Image: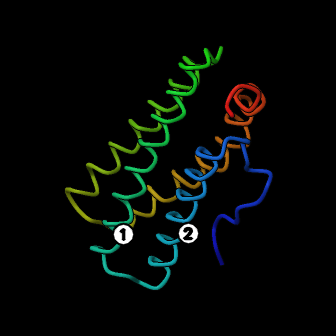
Amino acid sequence: MALIIWDGRYSVGIESLDWDHIVIASLINHLDEVKQHHGDEQTVAAIVRALIRMAYEHFAREELLFVRYDYPELHDHRREHRLLEEQLEELYAAYQRTPDPEISREIMELLNYWLVGHILKVDKRYAAFLAARVR
């Protein structure tokens, strides 16, 4: 069963950002499936790289909208992004040194926790603000 089942409660009302979230959720689910079926670490590594790249691209898209529309919580939100990036960089560097299945699981769990918690608690705060401006 999928770790993340997308539904309307995750929507932030901005199509491009919702699509990013959906892609990240799909990659997390794919990584979980590969790990559950004892996939090789080469496949796991490719998914982990795609997940991290997608997260960074998503942060950039969000932050661009925040700057464009003068979102009042830009700095706090950006700080949360940088914190996650630091955590991901640390874990991914360790994973590159030693492609340990436990480290790739930690990366997946971090992104899963972040995606669900961040959308429902942090991203929802900008949903109405941006939805009223982006169209």
Seen at 61% across and 19% down, the residue is 69
User: Which marked residue is nearer to the observer: mark 1 or mark 2?
Assistant: 2
Within 10 Å of the Cα at label 1, are there few (<14), some (14-19), or many (20+) other Cα atoms? some
Q: Is residue 9 above or below residue 98?
A: above
Q: Quadrant of residue 5?
A: bottom right
**Front-most of residues 85 and 71:** 71
In the current view of this chain or complex, which residue is farthest to the bottom? Answer: 37
In the current view of this chain or complex, which residue is farthest to the front? Answer: 135
| Dot label at residue 3 | none
| Dot label at residue 101 | 1
In the rendered structure, the answer to whether residue 25 lies left or right of residue 36 reads right
**Front-most of residues 109 and 23:** 23
| Dot label at residue 29 | 2
Q: Is residue 123 above or below residue 46?
A: above
Q: Position of residue 120 (x, y in %)?
A: 73, 43
Q: Is residue 47 above or below residue 135?
A: below
SS at circle 2? helix
In the rendered image, which quarter contains the N terminus?
bottom right
Within 10 Å of the Cα at label 2, are there few (<14), some (14-19), or many (20+) other Cα atoms? some
Q: Is residue 21 above or below residue 39?
A: above
Residue type at numbered disc 2: Asn
**Front-most of residues 68 and 81:** 68
In the rendered image, which quarter contains the C terminus?
top right
Residue type at numbered disc 1: Pro
In the rendered structure, the answer to whether residue 87 lies left or right of residue 100 reads right
